[in-house]
Image (cartoon, helix red, strand yellow):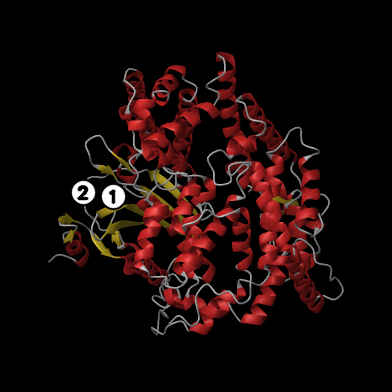
Amino acid sequence: MLSLRRALRSVCYHVGGRTVSTGWAPVGAAFNVKQHRRLDVLSKKTGLFGVPELSSPEGFQSVQDTALKTTESLLEKVCSTPPGAETVRIFDQLSDELCRVADLADFVRVAHPDSSFREAAEEACRTIGTMVEKLNTNIELCQSLKNLLENKSVMDSLDPETRRVAELFLFDFEISGIHLDEDKRQKAVNLNVAISDLSSDFLLGSNIPNRVERHVLPDHIRSQFMWDGKYIQISGLHADSPDDLVREAAYKIFLYPSARQLKCLDELLANRNLLAQLVGYPTFAHRALLGTMAKTPENVMMFLEKLSSKLRERTVKDFEMMSAMKMKLNPLNANLMPWDPPFYAGIVRAEKYNIEPSLYSPFFSLGACMEGLTFLFNQLLGITLYSEEPEKGEVWHEDVRKLAVVHENEGLLGYIYCDFFHRAEKPPQDCHFTIRGGRLKENGEYQLPVVVLMLNFPPSTKGSPTLLTPGMMENLFHEMGHAMHSMLGRTRYQHVTGTRCSTDFAEVPSILMEYFASDYRVVNQFARHYQTGQTLSKPMVSRLCESKKVAAASDLQLQVFYSILDQIYHGKHPLKGSTTDILKETQEEFYGLPYVPQTAWHLRFSHLAGYGAKYYSYLMSRAVASMVWKQCFMKNPFDRAMGERYRQEMLAHGGGKEPLLMVQGMLQKCPSVDDFVDALVSDLDPDFETFLMDSE
């Protein structure tokens, strides 16, 4: 007799007039039980993500060699092709060949539990990255694109997406210094390689613990930290510790400056500035912000300074509130310090709203949350998530789940691999990785997108499924917003597929999902106690929403400070002082709490590696998401017509359309800087709820 799983694997599913043989099963059950892979001794082992060569680390050499060989062939082909749409198609095919290796390797090098896989992937990233830099300074390749762009009659005959992709490819050439002489082009390549290496080193250094001898700390707090022999290891800020001295010690020790990390940051910033000026831009920020919603660093600073001005009084009130709580709990040491806000804001939040996570977690089993997501996507977009069992060797850990994303009319849209559970040596960050971008292939078929969502949830136990805190649930919705963008950004060209868009637009779909996660009408569809089936009450959801406004202004102000610091570091060089001097000055002007001597928070600011000059993107994306929520979904979060408009105006284009034009299409107006600022500030108002209380 067939087992249930085998029976499910052989079911036929009718979609869009086609019959698809699938292994699809309901998504909730797949996440609420421990995964047990079927034992099939006859099945042939595949490799990671179904790539046969990647059944072993040595396979990376094979796939990169194949990609490089194909690249050489495509390079020869595109240089001999007459200007036309075919030119852009070959460019995109060339990009896809390299990205399919680089993107997959970029994930494996940080997430695979086997160090031999990680090392092989790291080498593949370097090899492909070097090839990309060489191509970006290849004169003959660039000329074949210029021949197209300079041919007005041919360009006029192309559709808007093809024209934009052609322009974006030329942009990549220009920011790499294609217009320079041979020596300077080689210098640009060398600078890009150095920047890549320095970014990796800085990212690694930002997470290395600091250590001190045990006797440095008072006896009564030593037990709060990990120690090995005579040394105590400090690997974080211990921001939630109820002991003021523990938080102070962690802050001062963890943020104590590392000379090596400081040198790495100085070199990274200097090399970025050299590259920008070499290829014709006044600062790295000017180079980095081309093609974004903000467009220029001047616009970014205008946005941040206006937002800071609007937040100032509210931030002062937040600090006063936290100071009063500190005075109440610790009258002998009542000055509010930089290590205090997360803890005392949490105390105020808990005291005022009673939002202990353990009260909520039983209602947020992972399976229930996944069912809630598939219900929401089905209502808004006609999409259902199904669990599909991976083949032997396809995933890197037995806990990884594979989801098929299926549209009611269009069929299978792509795959999401869910690496959701904590394990040793797994990176702590919640992330979305593109493994393969979607594109229209030469044979007319669509190359389905493949992504990974990586989170760090506790595993299920014998007595209960994985239970999420409200924060974990919100993070799940956030990351799934990225995944849906990847699935629905079904562009003709992979160069602009899904989340391959400007950084300050890429976070909009994910942050918008946070608004859905805070709406009672959405939460009520899935939040059930895992034992009793009881629904989560509306007052509990309201308290949770209101609690998020506690110290929200000072939290936003902190993000403004981080964003301005990022802009200054990537602005005019030479800098007006050391990076630490600039940190002190910027913190005191744009945050308000005093700088602590002999600390260097910026050396732990890992986003400087990956988001250079673009950290403001979180704030700008949140502003857009807020406007979209209030105007389009707050009245009815399940509005199918609005969901379709959202897909067509904002998700479908990926990076194939100007980001501000996508926002304008959704909002039916072009927002001003003041609109962005007002959207963020209005979220702080006590009378604003993410859902309308009287709408039912």
Of residue 379 and residue 220, the one placed in the foreground of this image is: 379
Q: Which of 43 and 434 is in front in this view?
A: 434
Residue 455: in sight, yes or no?
no
Work out whether residue 41 can be spotted.
Answer: yes
Q: How many labels does the image show?
A: 2
Q: The N terminus lies in which quarter of the figure?
A: bottom left
Q: Which is nearer the N-term, disc 2 or disc 1?
A: 2
For the residues marked 2 and 1, what is the alpha-carbon distance in whole angstroms?
A: 8 Å
Placement of 37 over or under 272, stated as above or below: below
Q: Residue 309 carries which label?
A: none
User: In the structure shown, which secondary structural element does the residue marked by tag 2 occupy?
Assistant: loop
- Pointer 2 residue: 43
Q: What residue is drawn where x is 63% and y is 76%?
A: 686
Q: Which amino acid does label 1 sit on?
A: Lys
- Tell me residue 171's x, y (percent): 50, 31
Is disc 2 in contact with disc 1, using a CB cutoff of under 8 Å?
yes
Which amino acid type is marked by label 2?
Ser
Task: Give the residue at the far left of this rendering.
Answer: 1
Question: Taking 177 as reference, is 530 above or below it?
Answer: below
The residue drawn where x is 56% and y is 76% is 544
SS for tag 1? Answer: loop
Where in the figure is residue 473, as x and y percent of width and height? Answer: 48, 67
User: Could you say where residue 36 lies in the image, as x and y percent from the top left?
Assistant: 31, 62
Judge from the rendering whether residue 297 lies leftward or rightward of residue 433; answer left or right.
Answer: right
Q: Where is residue 188 in the image (x, y as percent from the top left)?
A: 58, 23
- Within 10 Å of the Cα at label 2, are there few (<14), some (14-19), or many (20+) other Cα atoms? few
Residue 392 is marked as 1
Which of the pair 506/233 is nearer the observer? 506
